Image (spheres, rainbow, N blue to C red):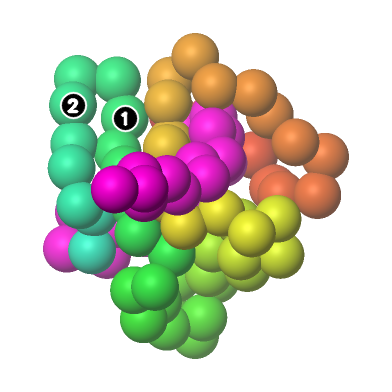
Amino acid sequence: MPFEIHRTIILSTGHLDPRELPQLEDHASMSSDDGWLLYTGRDIDPNTAPTLAAAVKLAVREKCVFIRFDSDGPLVDELPTYDW
């Protein structure tokens, strides 16, 4: 029986706008002390969570099914960053 394997992109939590955290927590598949796991198939409203929607768009473009927002994850140039 073949395994089902999904790609995950790892991004820094520094790409999360603190004002969008309630939406992330509503949509996250899992959370931990150092981040969240987000399924990219969730409907993220770009009008209320534009930064989160941009991260999902990036992940989908890279053919990733999940985003792991990790406090030690890398920063990427195409997404905004936030200090918190």
Chain part drawn in magenta: 1-26
Residue wearing tag 1: 35
Q: Position of residue 1 (x, y in %)?
A: 29, 48
Expressed as whole percent of the image width and height from the top left, the position of residue 51 reads 56, 61
Residue 7's place in the image compared with 84, above or below, is below
Crowd around label 1: few <14 · some 14–19 · many ≥20 (10 Å): some
Residue reaching furthest to the front: 1
Instruction: Label 1, secondary structure: give it.
Output: strand
- In the image, residue 45 lies at what x, y percent? 42, 83
Amino acid type, residue under disc 1 in the picture = Gly
> Is 39 on the left-hand or right-hand side of 52?
left
Q: Is residue 21 magenta?
A: yes
Contact (Cβ within 8 Å) of mark 2 with mark 1: yes
Q: Quadrant of residue 28?
A: bottom left
Q: Is residue 22 left or right of residue 19?
A: left
The residue identified by callout 2 is 32
